Image (spheres, rainbow, N blue to C red):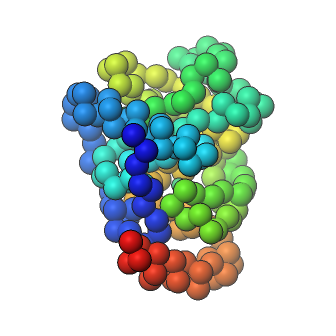
Amino acid sequence: MILDIKQYGEPVLRRKCDPVEEVDTDIRNFTQDLIDTMIDAEGIGLAAPQVGVDMRIAVVDVAHDPECVSFFKVAGEDANMVDFMPLIFINPELELSGPREADSEGCLSIQEIRAKVKRPTIVKAKLPQIDGSVLEIETDGLLARAIQHEVDHLNGILFTDRVSTTAKARLKRQLKDLGNTKWERR
Ligand code: NI
């Protein structure tokens, strides 16, 4: 099922999401809906609050660009990144390292804006799966960035919160307009 994607200004995007306590049929179905909605919107990631659900669940898929990471490890062993897409995560735990680098980001909940965001380049992540197993991955590049962006959503943080002070000043008016009008129209 394709879900409605919430837009900037909707309070659910600012909520710190609750951990999932038990992965049941509802959670499994919801995770599939999240994947279907991400694909339908041609996004590379989507988090539960973006469809109005304040639970710690997100999905990422960067299979369209196998070259977007320089390495991908599962449980410490080199693996083929594409085989693990779409990546599902429930109650994810991240460990960030490496130098911080700036790159352009966008978001399905803030479609009018793209801006550069500085983030650590390497992510080590423990990603509980819907079958109860835990996927331990380590990667960099666009995938590391996308995972951090989605986990931010689970904490009510949007990429526009993380842009430079100069960029923030430039985006302020645009975001104010989006926040005031966008979701009241619905
Ligand atoms: Ni986003």
- Looking at the image, residue 85 sits to the left or right of residue 5; the answer is right
Residue 163: give x, y in percent of width and height. Answer: 62, 67
Write down the quadrant of residue 81 in the picture. top right
Residue 61: give x, y in percent of width and height. Answer: 59, 35
Count up the numbered dots.
0
52 or 173, nearer to the observer: 52
- Looking at the image, residue 79 sits to the left or right of residue 89; the answer is right
99 or 140, nearer to the observer: 140
- Looking at the image, residue 37 sits to the left or right of residue 48; the answer is right
Q: Is residue 162 visible?
A: no
In this picture, is 76 found above or below 164?
Answer: above
- Taking the spot 56% from the left edge, 61% from the top edge, the residue there is 159
- Taking the spot 40% from the left edge, 33% from the top edge, the residue there is 32
Q: Is residue 106 visible?
A: yes
In this picture, is 59 found above or below 129?
Answer: below
- Looking at the image, residue 110 sits to the left or right of residue 153; the answer is right
In this picture, is 110 found above or below 131?
Answer: below
Task: State the quadrant of the N terminus.
Answer: top left
Residue 7: give x, y in percent of width and height. Answer: 46, 65
- Taking the spot 65% from the left edge, 23% from the top edge, the residue there is 82
Residue 40: give x, y in percent of width and height. Answer: 54, 44
Task: State the quadrant of the C terminus.
Answer: bottom left
134 or 81, nearer to the observer: 81
- Taking the spot 63% from the left edge, 82% from the top edge, the residue there is 169
